[in-house]
């Protein structure tokens, strides 16, 4: 049995940094990137985000040009993380409670900066598996990231619960045959502070493989 966490917006308050970084690079092309635009970017790969930005801003960029923009966006994001990254309220308590109960945990994220963020916040050792965007060919909503996490930890997909704040992640988890606990989404919990280890273990007890 295992609980798999998304990273940005679930464990750490970094989702806003992705938004601000995309907003900055879009501004350099004369496009005003809005929070509504950003909703479509949540949980998907950087390549897909770049494709969407080109469509939104009517940009025609070569492969090399796109890579430069992605590099610029990542530099802005990492600078923000370096200056101000912290765990969301309730995260450390939940991780400790699950660890004490002997529940396996993993991170499954589209981000390529997962290890940097986990090490920066000091929670790397809580996880039995860590899968990031560098490790899979297909990003969410494809289930690869979650399936790989389950395989790495030696757990069946049907024994996993995924905590997600993005529709793409919810779709990925369901495609993998996993239970999903949505956060900051319609029909889900407002934040991770509303989720207890006892609640998750109760859900795990209902898993049927």
Image (tube, rainbow, N blue to C red):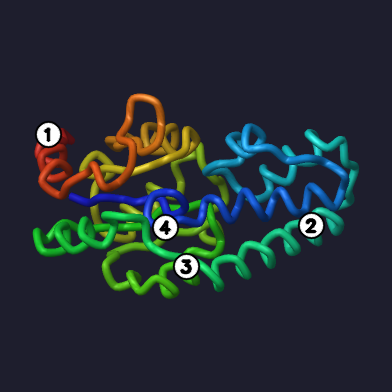
| Residue contact at pointers 1 and 3, CB within 8 angstroms | no
Q: Judge left or right: residue 43 versus residue 191.
A: right
* Alpha-carbon span between mark 4 and mark 1: 28 Å
Mark 4 or 1: in front is 4
Q: Position of residue 15 (x, y in %)?
A: 52, 51
> What secondary structure is found at the residue carrying circle 2?
helix
* Alpha-carbon span between mark 2 and mark 1: 45 Å
| Label whose residue precedes the other's in the sequence (4 or 1) | 4
Q: Quadrant of the C terminus?
A: top left
Between 90 and 187, which is closer to the camera in this rendering?
Answer: 90
The residue under the point 47% across, 67% down is: 117
Task: Report the residue marked by disc 3.
Answer: 117
Q: Position of residue 57 (x, y in %)?
A: 83, 37
User: Going by the picture, which residue comes out furthest to the top?
Assistant: 187
Q: Kindly identify which numbered label has been placed on residue 66.
A: none
Q: Kindly identify which numbered label has been placed on residue 69.
A: 2
Between 35 and 98, which is closer to the camera in this rendering?
Answer: 35
| Residue contact at pointers 4 and 3, CB within 8 angstroms | yes
> What secondary structure is found at the residue carrying circle 4?
loop
| Label whose residue precedes the other's in the sequence (2 or 3) | 2
Q: Judge left or right: residue 199 versus residue 19.
A: left
Q: Judge left or right: residue 58 versus residue 36.
A: right
**In the rendered view, would you say 81 is above or below 19?**
below
């Amino acid at each position: 049995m295992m609980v798999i966490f998304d990273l940005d917006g679930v464990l750490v308050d970094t989702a806003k940094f992705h938004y601000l970084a995309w907003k900055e690079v879009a501004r350099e092309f004369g496009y005003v990137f809005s929070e509504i635009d950003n909703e479509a970017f949540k949980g998907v790969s950087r390549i897909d985000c770049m494709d969407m930005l080109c469509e939104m801003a009517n940009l025609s960029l070569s492969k090399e040009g796109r890579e430069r923009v992605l590099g610029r966006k990542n530099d802005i994001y990492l600078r923000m993380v370096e200056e101000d990254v912290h765990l969301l309220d309730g995260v450390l308590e939940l991780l400790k409670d699950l660890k004490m109960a002997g529940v396996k945990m993993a991170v499954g994220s589209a981000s390529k900066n997962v290890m940097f963020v986990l090490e920066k916040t000091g929670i790397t050792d809580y996880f039995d598996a860590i899968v990031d965007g560098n490790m899979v060919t297909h990003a969410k909503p494809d289930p690869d990231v979650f399936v790989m996490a389950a395989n790495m930890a030696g757990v069946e997909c049907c024994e996993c619960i995924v905590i997600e704040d993005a529709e793409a992640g919810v779709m990925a988890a369901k495609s993998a045959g996993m239970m999903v606990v949505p956060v900051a989404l319609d029909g889900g919990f407002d934040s991770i502070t509303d989720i207890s280890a006892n609640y998750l273990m109760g859900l795990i007890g209902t898993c049927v493989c």
